[in-house]
Amino acid sequence: MATWQEIENDAPEFAARFLRLFDAGKHKTMATLRRDGSPRISGTETQFTQGELWLGSMTKAVKAADLLRDGRMALHGPTADPGEEGSGTWPGEAKLSGRAVEVTDPLVVKSVVGGEPGESHLFRVEIEGAVITRVEDAMLVIESWAPGRGVSVVRRR
C-alpha cells in the first residue's frame, strides 16, 4: 500500500495525468463490500492533500459502515464520452484500489476537513494501485502503477 505522495515521487508524470482525469469532476464512484461480501456502488467526493488521498462520509451512511467493517474499496473518477469525432478524442479515465482507514485524530480531522471528529467520517486511502485507461491510435492503452513495481503499460487492439 502507498500514499499519494509516494506515487507522485515515484511517477510524477503518471500522477499528474491521473489527477487531471480523476479530478475532471467533483463526484467519484466508489465500490465497497457489503456485510455479505457483495459489492456496493456509492457516490463520493475525494481530496488530495498533505500527500494523502482522503474521502469522507456522513455518519451512519452505509458506505461508511462498509468501510469500517472492511476497508477494501475502489474509486472510479468521472468519465467523458468520446464525442462525435470518435474514440481518439477520449481523454481516458482514472481509477484506483486500496484500503480506507478511518482517521479520528482531532488535529488531523481539523486540518483536512475543518470539522470535529464525530461530525462525519474521515478516511485516508492506502493505495494498492492506480490505473489510467485511454485510447491511442485505435488501441486501448492501460497504464498502471503499483508499489514496488512502478508504472507498466499494456496496449491492446
Image (tube, rainbow, N blue to C red):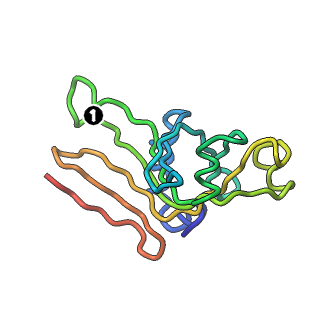
Q: Amino acid at mark 1?
A: Thr
The location of residue 77, given as percent across then percent down, is: 46, 42
Left or right placement of residue 11 versus residue 105 in this view: left
In this rendering, is residue 101 above or below 83?
below
Residue depicted at x 42% and y 47%: 94
The location of residue 25, given as percent across then percent down, is: 51, 33
* Residue on which the image places disc 1: 89
User: The N terminus appears in which quarter of the rendering?
Assistant: bottom right
Residue, far front: 36
Closer to us: 153 or 97: 97
Tag 1: Cα neighbours inside 10 Å, few (<14), some, or many (≥20)?
Answer: some
Residue depicted at x 47% and y 48%: 31
The location of residue 141, given as percent across then percent down, is: 26, 53
Picture quadrant where residue 80 is located: top left
Secondary structure of residue under mark 1: helix
Closer to us: 13 or 56: 56
